[in-house]
Amino acid sequence: MTKRPPPEALEPVEVEPPPAHISILELLSSKTLSVCWSDPRSGHYADQVWRIGLARKDAFCVLTGRPIRRGDPVFRPRACETYFPANRNRMILASEVPGYARGILLD
């Protein structure tokens, strides 16, 4: 028999419904891509820049629904001190981006 981990050891993963429409428009550089995002809850972004980074928490890929684990390479919407898009916490697994291989976007 195997023991189950205590309930406090399991961190809940926030499940959000997928956006109404999401598509990768263009690979802009080795670290950025352009995404078209449309969702009635978070708005419409016709040409939003997403940047590569590491997942800070467990989540789900908005492109495929696959699980994302903390530390996975992901793309997230670019945000700064004066600009916080409503979808800033959503992520795309980097491995699901066409042309992405071992951390490098291929031309």
Image: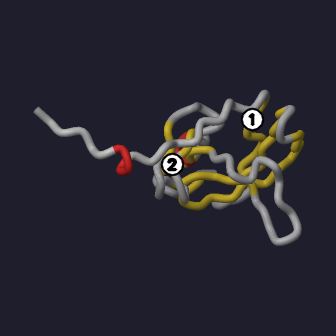
Q: Give the quarter of the image for residue 7.
A: top left
Instruction: Residue type at mark 1: give it.
Output: Ser
> Of all residues shown, which one is farthest toward the front?
7
Quarter of the figure that contains the N terminus: top left
Label 1: which residue? 23
Secondary structure at badge 2 equals: loop
Secondary structure of the residue carrying numbered label 1? strand
Residue at the top extreme, as displayed? 20
Q: Nearer the viewer, mark 1 or mark 2?
A: 2
Instruction: State the image quarter where residue 63 is shown.
Output: top right
Tell me, for residue 58, which label it has, or none. 2
Question: Hey, what amino acid is under mark 2?
Answer: Asp
Going from the N terminus, do you reach mark 1 or mark 2 first?
1
Q: Residue at x 58, y 52 (%)?
A: 74
Q: Residue at x 52, y 34 (%)?
A: 66
**How far across and down, in percent of the image, does residue 50 sit?**
73, 54
Residue 48 is situated, as x and y percent measured from the top left of the image, at 82, 50
Q: Horizontal and vertical percent for residue 106? A: 59, 51
- The circle on residue 6 is none
**Spatial CA span between label 1 and label 2:** 22 Å
Name the side, left or right, on which 7 lies relative to 29: left
Q: Where is 55 relative to 16, above or below?
A: below
- How many other residues sit within 10 Å of disc 1, few (<14), some (14-19) or many (≥20)? few
